[in-house]
Image (cartoon, coloured by chain):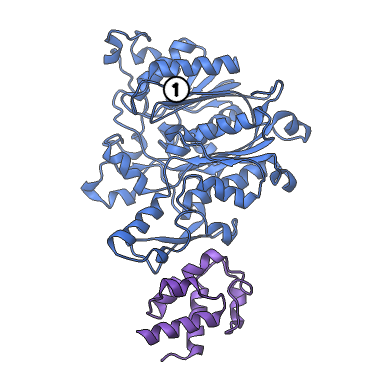
Chain colours: A blue, B purple
């Protein structure tokens, strides 16, 4: 359990962000109200067989990478990847899928920002906790097709189908790169994965099991991943790319399936202070729970209320900004908005919805949005909710049903909480919320070190 | 029938595509060169080299032969010639 007096600081961050060359570029774009979502040529190429064609995707070239395709296999089987900037050794590239490479690059940036020495990084008290939402689908699709449909031998795929596709592959690759000797695991909780890994890492330090952890979530660009959601009819369509993700707007019609990576370096607060590290934020508390209502997909008002109660009991801090999950789906947005105002009241805070700018990064969503929240503390600005132009002035259908115990005002009553452009204000505490299929909910509170 | 020298030259071309092998070491490949000890080839890359060898020399190896394959260049040359003989 928690050790009294032991606090956890965020001391480094890094990642992969659509259209962005680095973290500074990401920071500049999100606070200047830019969309990172584009029409995706890979999706467009499938014509009427695919429903949505917009995404916050990242190309190999944008990450300084290149793919070498196997000459033994058909259908673009990645034999390995090239790091054109020579940041990662070839032996580490050989065992990595694209998401694992992003995780390694993000980890290197986070450790550099943290200023950890080699002995600190390689310590038994340094852990790696990183996960993703999907498998290594780019590699699996081609490997399976060559075996099942084309009748090729298993050996033509080489020896790296397992290490590059398994759950835990990002954490495995990062630990082999940085050579830490502490705990190395992956947490999987669907679209709460990114935050879930950071929350679990926080607890490892808070409970005294580790002193430092590299933590986060990654979702490598993959049309194979995209089409699963496309088939569910849950992706946005009919808008221009930059207008397609529109949390809370009355005309929203689904989320934008995106990709990215967010990695942070966490450290026991007193140790970080003692070595003179820059404290990006302090983690006030982390809480997660389940809806317990047998529903795989539909969000739960009571589940989210219990999530807030658990978080506030631990952190004791009312936030200046609530960084919502805010997916731009019909069901998710109003339930989330109502649970937030039911707990926090109708004023005194703002709601920030980063998915309006870069879409839903699935297993990376929680960690990249955590980084966006760290940047809100740093920049003293609120990230906007782009395209939240018109909010429903009428009650949602579920608000009129018997048994509804939440707010009885329409979404439009909370217009002032949801800025459409970035906003300058004093930001001392941010709450981050993420939820996943299966009714899993995660919440974390972070504050400036003042 | 291909000569052993010609086969070794073909193997070097394959090894050039394996990025975990230092290309500087490929200038002095002989029959006695050991993939693991001399070239520091990760053992996991050996099956990739074997599969590329089958493609390049248009042969099919038996699983038993691959299981028993030594780690020297001459072992692969021998297996190629043996497999071509069978064909």
Q: Element under label 1? A: loop
Coordinates of residue A127 in the picture (x, y in percent) = 63, 40
Mark 1 chain: A
Of A427 and A80, nearer the camera is A80
Coordinates of residue B55 in the picture (x, y in percent) = 39, 75
Seen at 28% across and 37% down, the residue is A232
Seen at 40% across and 69% down, the residue is A71
Residue A315 left/right relative to A328: right
Q: Number of numbered discs present?
A: 1
- The residue most toward the right is A274
Residue A133 left/right relative to A202: left
The quarter of the rendered structure image containing the C terminus of chain A is top right
Seen at 49% across and 78% down, the residue is B13
Coordinates of residue A368 in the picture (x, y in percent) = 51, 36
Bin the neighbour count of mark 1 within 10 Å (Cα to Cα): few under 14, some 14-19, many 20 and up: many
| Residue A24 in sight | no
Which residue is label 1 attached to? A419
The answer to which quarter of the image holds residue A79 is bottom left
- Above-or-below relation of A242 to A328: below
Of A108 and A44, nearer the camera is A108
Coordinates of residue A75 in the picture (x, y in percent) = 33, 61
- Above-or-below relation of A111 to A425: below
The answer to which quarter of the image holds residue A407 is top left
The quarter of the rendered structure image containing the N terminus of chain A is top right
């Amino acid at each position: 359990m928690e050790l009294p007096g032991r606090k956890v600081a965020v001391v480094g961050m890094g990642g992969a962000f659509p259209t962005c060359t680095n973290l500074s570029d990401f920071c500049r774009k999100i606070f200047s109200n830019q969309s990172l979502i584009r029409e995706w040529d890979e999706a467009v190429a499938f014509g009427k067989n695919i429903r949505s064609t917009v995404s916050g995707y990242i190309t190999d070239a944008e990450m300084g990478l290149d793919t070498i395709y196997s000459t033994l296999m058909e259908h673009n089987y990645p034999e390995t990847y090239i790091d054109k900037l020579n940041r990662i050794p070839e032996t580490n590239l050989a065992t990595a899928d694209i998401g694992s490479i992003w995780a390694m690059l993000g980890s290197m940036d986070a450790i550099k920002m943290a200023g950890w020495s080699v002995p600190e990084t390689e310590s038994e008290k340094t852990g790696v906790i990183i996960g993703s939402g999907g498998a290594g689908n780019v590699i699996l699709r081609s490997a399976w097709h060559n075996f099942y449909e084309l009748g090729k031998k298993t050996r033509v795929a080489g020896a790296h189908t397992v290490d590059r596709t398994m759950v835990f592959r990002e954490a495995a690759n990062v630990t082999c790169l940085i050579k830490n000797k502490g705990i190395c695991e992956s947490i999987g909780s669907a679209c709460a994965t990114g935050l879930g890994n950071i929350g679990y890492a926080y607890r490892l330090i808070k409970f005294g099991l580790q002193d430092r952890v590299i933590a986060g979530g990654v979702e490598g660009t993959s049309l194979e991943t995209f089409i699963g959601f496309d088939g569910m009819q849950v992706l946005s369509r009919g808008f221009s790319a930059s207008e397609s993700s529109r949390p809370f707007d009355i005309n929203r019609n689904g989320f934008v399936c995106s990709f990215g990576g967010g990695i942070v370096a966490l450290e026991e607060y007193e140790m970080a202070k003692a070595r003179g590290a820059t404290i990006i934020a302090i983690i006030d508390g982390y809480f997660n729970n389940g809806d317990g209502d047998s529903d795989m997909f539909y969000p739960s008002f009571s589940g989210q209320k219990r999530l807030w109660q658990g978080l506030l009991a631990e952190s004791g801090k009312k936030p200046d900004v609530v960084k919502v999950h805010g997916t731009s789906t019909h069901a998710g947005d109003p339930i989330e908005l109502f649970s937030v105002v039911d707990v926090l009241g109708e004023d005194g805070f703002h709601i920030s919805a980063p998915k309006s700018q870069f879409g839903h990064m699935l297993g990376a969503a929680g960690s990249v949005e955590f980084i966006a929240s760290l940047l809100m503390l740093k920049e003293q600005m609120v990230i906007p909710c782009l395209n939240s132009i018109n909010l429903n002035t009428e009650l949602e259908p579920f608000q009129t049903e018997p048994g509804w115990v939440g707010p009885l005002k329409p979404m439009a009553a909370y217009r002032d909480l949801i800025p459409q452009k970035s906003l300058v204000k004093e930001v001392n505490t941010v709450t981050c919320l993420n939820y996943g299929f299966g009714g899993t909910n995660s919440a974390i509170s972070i504050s400036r070190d003042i | 029938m291909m000569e052993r020298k010609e086969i070794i030259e073909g193997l070097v071309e394959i090894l050039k595509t394996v990025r975990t092998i230092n290309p500087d070491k490929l200038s002095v490949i002989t029959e006695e060169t050991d993939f693991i000890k001399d070239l520091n080839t990760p053992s996991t890359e050996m099956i990739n080299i074997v599969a590329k060898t089958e493609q390049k020399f248009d042969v099919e190896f038996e699983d038993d032969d691959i299981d028993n394959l030594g780690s020297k260049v001459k072992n692969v040359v021998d297996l190629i010639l043996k497999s071509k003989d069978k064909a």
